[in-house]
């Protein structure tokens, strides 16, 4: 079977359900899970553009929003990492910025290595 699994997550109900299947792969010989979360850069730039008063401070607002998104994602990733470690997996965590499908493919293409 697979010894290493790439688990992309957006923290949705569907991805939580997929996590339960990932956990079951331990019995089939999977030893390592690489958790990947992508922060969609379009979300960072789209939100501030909707706030008229923020236009003069657009970069500040984008930076603050990105920081909040990263902080929330790190907290979620830590919970998932702990769950998988409790099951006996070796876990690597990656948080990237960009387009979901492009970044997931890039991570997979690089053999899921850490930067």
Image (spheres, rainbow, N blue to C red):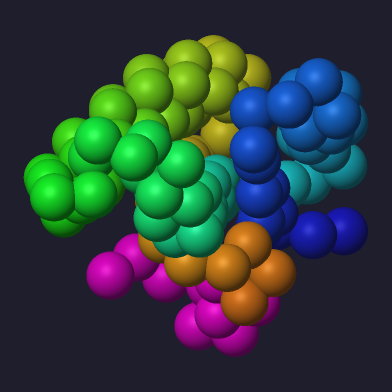
Q: Position of residue 101 (x, y in %)?
A: 69, 69
Determine whether, in the image, residue 85 is placed left or right of residue 66. Answer: right
Residue lying farthest bottom? 109
Q: Nearer the viewer, residue 94 or 98?
A: 98
- The reply to whether residue 80 is in sight is yes
Determine whether, in the image, residue 5 is placed left or right of residue 79. Answer: right
Asked which quadrant contains residue 84, the reply is top right
Q: Position of residue 108 (x, y in %)?
A: 61, 74
Q: Position of residue 92 (x, y in %)?
A: 43, 47
Q: How many marks?
A: 0
Magenta-highlighted residues: 103-115
Residue beneath the point at 79% across and 59% down: 2
- The reply to whether residue 24 is in sight is no
Determine whether, in the image, residue 99 is placed left or right of residue 66. Answer: right
The answer to whether residue 70 is above or below residue 36 is above
Q: Where the N terminus falls, by quadrant?
A: bottom right
Residue beneath the point at 63% across and 19% down: 87
Q: Nearer the viewer, residue 51 or 13?
A: 51
Asked which quadrant contains residue 25, the reply is top right
Residue beneath the point at 73% across and 26% down: 12
Q: Nearer the viewer, residue 10 or 109?
A: 10
Q: Where the C terminus falls, by quadrant?
A: bottom left
Q: Is residue 107 magenta?
A: yes
The answer to whether residue 67 is above or below residue 62 is above
């Amino acid at each position: 079977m697979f010894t290493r699994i790439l688990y992309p997550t957006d923290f949705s109900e569907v991805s939580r359900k997929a996590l339960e299947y990932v956990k079951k792969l331990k019995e089939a010989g999977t030893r390592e899970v690489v958790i990947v979360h992508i922060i969609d850069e379009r979300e960072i730039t789209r939100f501030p553009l909707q706030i008229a008063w923020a236009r003069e401070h657009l970069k500040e607002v984008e930076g603050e929003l990105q920081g909040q998104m990263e902080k929330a994602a790190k907290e979620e990733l830590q919970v998932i990492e702990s769950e998988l470690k409790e099951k006996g997996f070796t876990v690597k965590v990656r948080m990237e910025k960009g387009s979901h499908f492009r970044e997931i493919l890039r991570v997979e293409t690089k053999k899921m290595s850490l930067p």
